[in-house]
Image: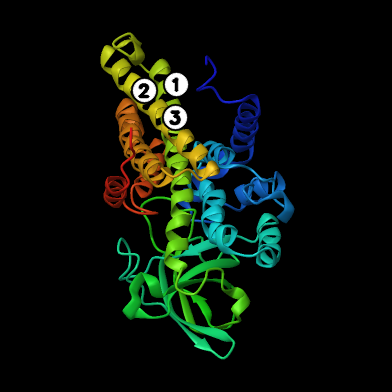
Amino acid sequence: MENLFDLPAEYKELRTSVRALAEKEIAPFAQAVDEEHRFPLEAKNALVKNGLYAAHVPTEFGGDGADALAAVLIIEEVARVCGSSSLLPAVNKLGSMPLILGGNDEQKKRWLPRLVKGEGFSYCLSESEAGSDASALRTKVERSGDGWVLNGSKKWITNAGESEFYSVIAQGDPKLRSKGITAFIVEKSDPGVSFGAPEKKMGMRGSPTREVYFDNVELSDDRRISEVGEGFALAMNTLDHTRITIAAQAIGLAQGAFDVATKYAHERHQFGKPIFDFQAIQFILADMAMNIEAARLLTYSAAIKSENNEKDLTFFSAASKCFASDMAMKVTQDAIQVLGGYGYVSDYPVERMMRDTKLTQIYEGTNQIQRIVMARNLPNA
């Protein structure tokens, strides 16, 4: 019982190795990635080289077969130094989960090995008029002989233009709403696929966010990864498994900010002593550490439930994302407060971490939506 809440040795070793990699090959470029609004190519190369770009892919399709907890640890440690870079493994899992959950072996063999080698995967659900109301899709797919024709656009697509593959959730019969939706794989090279200009964002500036346009995109039926009319259910099942990665990202950002604030508190002297010696600072840091650990345990629990596909996954997935992102927003703000004026300028990374963290409260369902999801799936004691 004494080790019930302790990570097994292999996970600790994974954390240590990913942290070392992140600090050596990702952290040195994090500030430039943010300031230049550029794709974190150095991080991508390092993650691909070390099998971390899409570690969740099963071994039979070329991946490491990392379970949900291992994927969480990878994302957490990358986010600790660079939020934008952590979206590489996170979005690759999000984009490919509909294929993993709904596709057949032939489809998985077609796309997953290429993902592992560096051809990214994005997730296309949101639209201009279908954000929180995800079933109100207008992107339309119609039968055309033995195949399909796709028309419309998707909004706020992470890593759009960089990814080679896209899980696209489209409406086949608007009168059926969620029961008319089907899921497909679209490739960047498909005729009729194009992208809007990158959004100018407050945070996560190294991860391009763009619209994706579909103009009479012809798809054979082997691109379909859900049963006809079951795409919405597949999309929601995907989010149950991937919201946990957003919780991991938030924890990593919070941990990174906490590390900076703690180090600074010991080094910064005022009134003749380190500011850590003042009770006001001690209380701030103590609350930060307490809440990070609480979010971490909840998220790891949710990851295990994801791996086992437990019946209360929906609640725990939403809870981990909601709690961890709200926690991280408070922690990163408090880190800025500990640093004072230095926290407000880019000499230190905490202001970047705060800007990056804000998005974790919004994407993959706002935290208001998460509370609705939790209320509808309250666990039994």
Crowding around mark 1 (Cα neighbors within 10 Å: few <14, some 14 to 19, many 20+) is: few
- Quadrant where the C terminus sits is top left
- Callout 3, which amino acid? Leu
Q: Which residue is mark 2?
A: 290
Residue 258 is drawn in which quadrant?
top left
Considering depth in this image, is 253 or 215 the residue closer to the camera?
215
In the depicted structure, whether residue 52 falls above or below residue 336: below
The nearer-to-camera label among 2 and 1 is: 2
Q: Looking at the image, which is closer to me, 307 or 295?
A: 307
Determine contact: label 3, label 1, CB under 8 Å. no
Give x and y (percent) for residue 325: 36, 41
Tag 3, which secondary structure? helix
Which residue in the rendered view is the most extreme toward the bottom? 145
User: Mark 2: which secondary structure?
Assistant: helix
- Relative depth, front residue between 195 and 246: 246
Which residue in the protein does label 3 denote? 297
Q: Amino acid at mark 2?
A: Met
Residue bearing mark 1: 263
Query: How far separated are the C-alphas under marks 3 and 2?
Result: 11 Å
Which one is nearer the viewer's eye here, 311 or 298? 311
Q: Residue at x 44, y 31 (%)?
A: 296
